[in-house]
């Protein structure tokens, strides 16, 4: 992957695995866009801005499928798609007023989606482990007393949480990033049956947190939870995103090594790369 391969360690994951590569592709896009001055629309409840987040560019380590480390507040929390880590400098003032400097690691967690762009019919499918757990965790970090009624306020602190990488039939790529609060508000105002069912679970977890200061994903680590999903269609409806879709980046600009292809996007990337390896026949 562009910006990732051979530069920053990735735990023990295999980048040539399509499952891992599919998760890393949006992060690779962010690094490529930053290097090539390509703006990424950032959607919040206040409107559309441009993503400016140095933590997503200037990080020292990355990994996939990692859970938040706060095990007291979040019981058996599900894994996040991507974790990016950054070394920070902390300053501590002692009783003798001497200042001590120390290094610590700050982790950021992201959900990623790679979707075929179909205009107003572009669908984003979200699992319950994200919308009823990790999404709320992200919101609580900056808004510790959050309640669902607060979605009507403009004072909420919003954080980039979902990277949606769009690809078209020409295998070119574009991206839009959503804030945590915006995603929750879209679910809350969604009129589909799935959104309404999803909100019941979200309210349940919010009630648990505001009562006991805990969110339980699983009572036991080995417990099995139902995999409920909801769908969002952010490019249609009254609150549709009216951002320009440029598709400036070729998929082969990001995929620097062979990935075990399966279908659709990945088969197309493999074919395009093979075409580029075949030299034209001399005349």
Image (cartoon, rainbow, N blue to C red):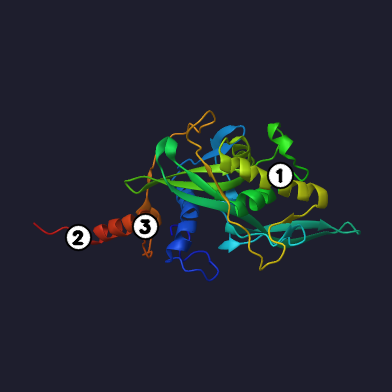
Give the structural element (helix, strand or loop) at label 2: loop
Residue position for label 1: 203
Q: CA distance from mark 1 to mark 2?
A: 59 Å
Q: Residue 80's spot in the image, x, y percent?
A: 60, 57
Q: Specify which label sits upstream in the sequence, 3 or 1.
A: 1
Q: Residue 279 bears which disc, if any? A: 2
Q: Is residue 76 above or below residue 124?
A: below
Q: CA distance from mark 3 to mark 1?
A: 38 Å
* Placement of the C terminus among the 4 image quadrants: bottom left
Callout 1 crowding tier (Cα within 10 Å): few <14, some 14–19, many ≥20: some
Which residue in the rendered view is the most extreme toward the right? 95
Residue position for label 3: 266
Q: Specify which label sits upstream in the sequence, 1 or 2.
A: 1
Q: Residue 196's spot in the image, x, y percent?
A: 62, 40
Give the structural element (helix, strand or loop) at label 3: helix
Give the structural element (helix, strand or loop) at label 1: helix
Q: Residue 3's spot in the image, x, y percent?
A: 47, 58
């Amino acid at each position: 992957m562009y910006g990732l391969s051979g530069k920053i360690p990735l735990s023990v994951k295999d980048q040539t695995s399509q499952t891992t590569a599919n998760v890393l592709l949006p992060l690779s896009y962010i690094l490529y866009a930053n290097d090539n001055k390509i703006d990424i629309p950032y959607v919040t409840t206040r409107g559309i801005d441009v993503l400016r987040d140095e933590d997503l560019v200037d990080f020292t380590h990355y990994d996939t499928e990692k859970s938040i480390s706060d095990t007291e507040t979040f019981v058996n929390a599900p894994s996040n798609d991507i974790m990016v880590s950054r070394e920070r400098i902390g300053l501590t003032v002692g009783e003798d007023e001497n200042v001590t400097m120390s290094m610590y690691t700050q982790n950021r967690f992201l959900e990623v989606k790679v979707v075929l762009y179909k205009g107003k019919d572009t669908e984003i499918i979200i699992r319950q482990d994200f919308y009823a757990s990790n999404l709320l965790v992200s919101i609580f970090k900056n808004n510790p007393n959050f309640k669902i009624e607060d979605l009507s306020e403009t004072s909420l602190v919003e954080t980039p949480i979902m990277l949606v990488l769009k690809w078209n039939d020409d295998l070119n790529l574009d991206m839009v990033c959503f804030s945590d609060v915006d995603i929750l508000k879209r679910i809350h105002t969604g009129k589909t049956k799935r959104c309404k069912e999803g909100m019941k679970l979200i309210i349940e977890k919010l009630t648990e947190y505001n009562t006991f200061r805990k969110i339980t994903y699983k009572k036991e680590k080995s417990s099995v939870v139902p995999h409920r999903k909801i769908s969002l269609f952010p490019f249609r409806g009254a609150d549709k995103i009216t951002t320009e879709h440029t598709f400036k980046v070729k998929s082969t600009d990001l995929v620097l090594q062979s990935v075990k292809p399966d279908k659709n996007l990945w088969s197309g990337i493999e074919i395009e790369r093979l075409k580029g390896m075949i030299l034209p026949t001399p005349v």
